[in-house]
């Protein structure tokens, strides 16, 4: 079913050693669909994720031993071939989060499942589109799926918005890829307050995204900030995007009966010994690559409601620099151009 115009080989980035972040560019065959839901996409751009080069090393039981070690699970590109009866057709401009257990998009052609794909927002170019899938899906699931805000509010449901207006939300790493979308989603959903935790240098940026309060972590820890006025500063929902020891400070900012969601580590693992709070929910999760949710996000982006944060852009031959940059120090996403 592949187009006769397809080349026989392509450039692909490989990680030869799971224990090393050293990458190399190889010439490999263009992939052939093997699953009934496989869609072949010509990759325009991908976006490295913080820590993805260590996942197979740290969680070996989750990854097939014979997985082709192509990183870059975020994909933006053009459909080349799709299954019969698919909602996608050759020429469609799409984006996706490819499941981490399969080869990624740091190659000129990649395979994504129909369930992972959505049509790319028309108002975004390839670079911005590649910066969306992981960040936006993770934020959506943190705020709405696992968190307590109601997504119907983003689509105009005033009753849902009124219920959301009773809740305060705190987001860490608020100027990053995931955090930036979490701030935008919480603000658009009508949260009573959106507290952004980031450096003071990014205060104006996060306020533009919808933050109503900013905590400069370089000047003050979250527990110190919360303890100054617990009655007014405690929040109903925490979305943690940074992890590490600082997660423990966040317990001071959550209300009794609140919800604490993290994309980095389980909140209970860093609960201070002297904390007696009982929460409705504490949860750590790994993003699900759902094209159905990504399609909703795409429509919202086209409506002008949301935007991705891009830190830097690299050419394909600069693959090593791009993955090195995506180490957590970037403000927003790093994007690797593949065929643009």
Image (cartoon, grey):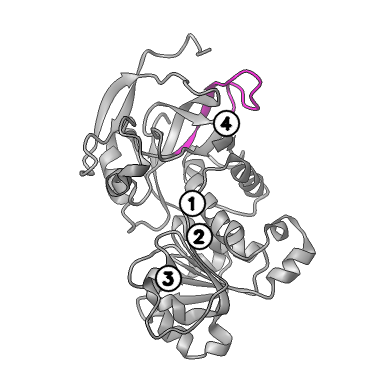
Distance CA(mark 1)–CA(mark 3): 24 Å
Image quarter of residue 43 = top left
Q: Is residue 126 left or right of residue 337?
A: right
| 26 in magenta | no
Q: Which residue was labeled with disc 4?
A: 114
Q: Which residue was labeled with disc 2?
A: 180
Distance CA(mark 2)–CA(mark 4): 27 Å
Tell whether label 2 touches label 3 (CB within 8 Å).
no
Q: Which residue was labeled with disc 3?
A: 268
Q: Which residue was labeled with disc 1?
A: 135
The answer to whether residue 117 of the structure is visible from this angle is: no
Q: Residues within 10 Å of mark 3 (few under 14, many from 20)?
A: some
Identify the element where label 2 is drawn.
Answer: helix
Q: Residue at x 41, y 21 (%)?
A: 31
Between discs 1 and 4, the one toward the N terminus = 4
Q: Which residues are magenta?
A: 74-93
Q: Residues within 10 Å of mark 2 (few under 14, many from 20)?
A: many
Q: Nearer the viewer, mark 1 or mark 4?
A: 4
């Amino acid at each position: 079913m592949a187009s006769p115009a397809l080349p026989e080989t392509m450039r692909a980035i490989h990680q030869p050693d799971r224990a090393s972040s050293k990458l190399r560019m190889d010439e490999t065959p263009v992939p052939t669909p093997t699953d009934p839901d496989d869609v072949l996409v010509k990759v325009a751009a991908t976006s490295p994720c913080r820590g993805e080069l260590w996942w197979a090393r740290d969680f070996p039981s989750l990854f097939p031993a014979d997985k082709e070690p192509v990183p870059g699970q975020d994909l933006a590109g053009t459909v080349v071939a799709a299954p019969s009866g698919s909602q996608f057709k050759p020429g469609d401009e799409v984006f996706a989060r490819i499941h981490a257990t399969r080869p990624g998009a740091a190659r000129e052609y990649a395979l994504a499942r129909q369930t992972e794909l959505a049509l790319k927002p028309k108002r975004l170019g390839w670079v911005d589109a590649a910066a969306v899938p992981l960040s936006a899906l993770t934020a959506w699931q943190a705020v709405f799926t696992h968190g307590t805000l109601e997504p119907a509010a983003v689509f105009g449901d005033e009753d849902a918005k009124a219920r959301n207006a009773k809740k305060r939300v705190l987001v860490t790493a608020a100027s990053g890829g995931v955090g930036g979308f979490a701030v935008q989603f919480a603000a658009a959903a009508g949260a009573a307050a959106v507290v952004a935790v980031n450096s003071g240098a990014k205060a104006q940026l996060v306020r533009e995204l919808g933050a109503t309060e900013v905590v400069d972590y370089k000047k003050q820890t979250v527990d110190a900030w919360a303890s100054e006025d617990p009655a007014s500063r405690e929040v109903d929902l925490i979305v943690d995007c940074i992890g590490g020891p600082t997660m423990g400070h966040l317990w001071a900012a959550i209300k009794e009966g609140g919800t604490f969601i993290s994309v980095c580590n389980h909140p209970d693992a860093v609960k201070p010994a002297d904390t007696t709070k009982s929460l409705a929910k504490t949860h750590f999760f790994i993003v699900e690559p759902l094209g159905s949710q990504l399609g909703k996000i795409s429509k919202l982006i086209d409506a002008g409601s949301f935007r991705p944060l891009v830190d830097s852009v690299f050419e394909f031959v600069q693959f090593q620099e791009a993955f090195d940059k995506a180490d957590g120090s970037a403000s927003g996403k790093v994007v690797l151009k593949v065929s643009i």
